[in-house]
Amino acid sequence: MNQSTKKLEIFKLFKKSKKFSIKWSSYFQVYEKIFSKYKNKKIKFVEIGVANGGSLFMWQKFFGKKAKIIGIDLNPNAKKLEKYGFKIYVGSQSDKNFWKNFYKKEGKIDIVLDDGGHKNLQQISTVHYSLPHIKDGGKIVVEDTSVSYVKKEFYNPSKYSFINYAKNIIDIIHRRSPLLNKNLNFYAKKIFFVEFFESIVVFSIDAKKCFANKQVKNNAKNEWAIDYRHNEYFRGLKSKLDREYGLLNKRNFFRKVTRKLFYRNFLFNLLDNFKIKKIFKEIQK
Ligand SMILES: C[S@@+](CC[C@H](N)C(=O)[O-])C[C@H]1O[C@@H](n2cnc3c(N)ncnc32)[C@H](O)[C@@H]1O
């Protein structure tokens, strides 16, 4: 066990919980990083996957008395934990109607953490059906996402794995850029950013920050800077022409032709791709 993990408050609370729980050792540093700002706040925290209830006690102590801790499990035995002050719902995380009723009763939620069945449909349903009901500034956290690479029991890797779904959301977030010229669906309008940790994916929700993007200029004058993006392969020639003739800094015909020939030439893109391919190969090892 990593020494700095042992010192974390959340880890100490986990160890002291009065009911059994198992978590992966790397999770505690992630919890501290993503959840600390909610401590002692009046939040609604939902954990899917109650089991013996060990983590529910940890969350209650960590977030404090003002937090309402809600558990969801398919196993009706989980209801027993209500005597400790938790609210428990019995139902399946992959059932659309379960979520409909759940959010009708509970209203908006601050944090949903999925430590349930971990199957692709279960994890994906949690995000898909919860997303419209998370408060701005809230989070959906999915644990054990490494099962997206596990064959036994989980039938992964698959086109429909949770991780592939999450990668898809990277594309959807980019729709807010006018460069993509795409419609903003409710994912694009709600998910401000996504964080990938080892085995944990975090969706940070904030509709107010998910506006369609546009460029803004500051008040200073655009003086002399020229974008050197396409100058990679002919840097020497470019500065010689600039120095000796001062031609390339002017918006004239000669500049247009040289740009076409030397800078925006697709052959240079092929050369770039050749180098990129080598880097891709290197990191795959
Ligand atoms: C890993 S355990 C939860 C452990 C608990 N969070 C802890 O740390 O102490 C997973 C739980 O998810 C529940 N579960 C499995 N499939 C589910 C589903 N479709 N909907 C809701 N809960 C489910 C199981 O019954 C089990 O209790």
Image (cartoon, rainbow, N blue to C red):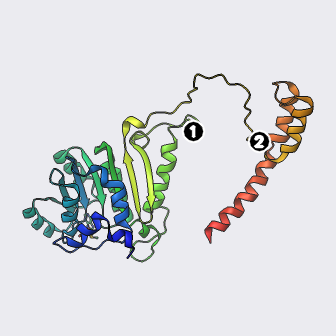
In the current view of this chain or complex, which residue is farthest to the left?
83
Element under label 2?
A: loop
Residue found 45% across the figure and 75% down from its top: 151
Q: Which quarter of the image is occupied by the C terminus?
A: bottom right
- Residue 166, x across and y down, in percent: 45, 55
Q: Amino acid at mark 1?
A: Leu
- Residue 122, x across and y down, in percent: 33, 62
Residue closest to the eye, 167 or 198: 198
Residue closest to the eye, 51 or 198: 198
Separation of marks 1 and 2 at Cα, in angstroms:
22 Å
- Residue 53, x across and y down, in percent: 18, 68
Q: Indicate whether 65 appears above or below 23.
A: above
Count of number-bearing discs:
2
Element under label 1?
A: loop
Rendering quadrant holding ligand 1:
bottom left
Residue closest to the eye, 155 or 64: 64
Q: Earlier in the sequence, mark 1 or mark 2?
A: 1
Label at residue 206: none
Sort mark 1 into few (<14), some (14-19) or many (20+) by Cα contacts within 10 Å.
Answer: few
Sort mark 2 into few (<14), some (14-19) or many (20+) by Cα contacts within 10 Å.
Answer: some
Q: Give the labeled residue for mark 2.
A: 230
Give the quadrant of residue 6: bottom left
- Residue 80, x across and y down, in percent: 10, 67
Q: Indicate whether 143 appears above or below 168.
A: below
| Label 2 lies in ligand 1 vicinity (Cβ under 8 Å) | no
Q: Give the labeled residue for mark 1.
A: 180
Residue found 23% across the figure and 53% down from its top: 45
